[in-house]
Amino acid sequence: MNTPRRPHLKSIPSTTDQPRPAEPGPASDSRRAPRNVGRKAVPSALRSDQQQGDGRYPVAWLHITAPPDWRAVPTATSKCLCGRDRSAVGRRRVLALIADHEAHKTACPLRTPQEGATAA
């Protein structure tokens, strides 16, 4: 029987017992700074705020969680920068907290001008 002979696809380099010295890399152009390979540019976190608003900012937050299932229990929290922090669980209590949050808009010391501040 004759077995088919395969041609050599690749030549195997000869190995030596002695280590070879490292070869220097390509000469760099001294006018350029070395490039950081693999790094991407990241915007600095210290940039000035580029948003030009009208001076308004949020003071109070109302967060309501009402799952789509009518059997689930809704929850709500009402927070304000003046220190007000209230929460409610259940339909009736959430509805009452929503009404209380709306009423707090007129009574909040951060939203209504103080009597002494306008007199000065």
Image: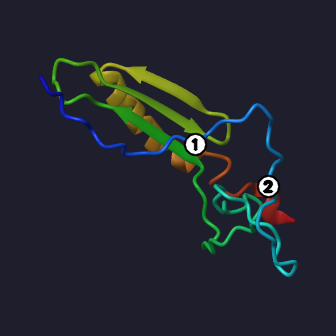
Foreground: 37 or 84?
A: 37
Question: From this viewpoint, which residue is outermost toward the left?
Answer: 1
Q: Which residue is mark 1?
A: 13
Relative to 48, residue 3 above or below: above
> How far from the left and from the top, in percent, is residue 113?
69, 58
Instruction: Quadrant for residue 102, please give it.
Output: top left
- Residue type indicated by callout 1: Pro
Question: From this viewpoint, which residue is outermost toward the bottom?
Answer: 31
Is disc 1 surrounded by few (<14), some (14 to 19) or many (20+) residues within 10 Å?
few
Q: Nearer the viewer, mark 1 or mark 2?
A: 1
Q: In the image, is 118 to the left or to the right of 67?
A: right
Is label 2 in a helix, a strand or a loop? loop
Foreground: 42 or 102?
A: 42
Relative to 32, residue 93 above or below: above
CA distance for labels 1 and 2 = 18 Å
Quadrant where the C terminus lies? bottom right
Seen at 65% across and 69% down, the residue is: 55
Seen at 70% across and 67% down, the residue is: 49
Q: Which mark is residue 23?
A: 2
Seen at 57% across and 53% down, the residue is: 58
Q: In the image, is 88 to the left or to the right of 107?
A: left
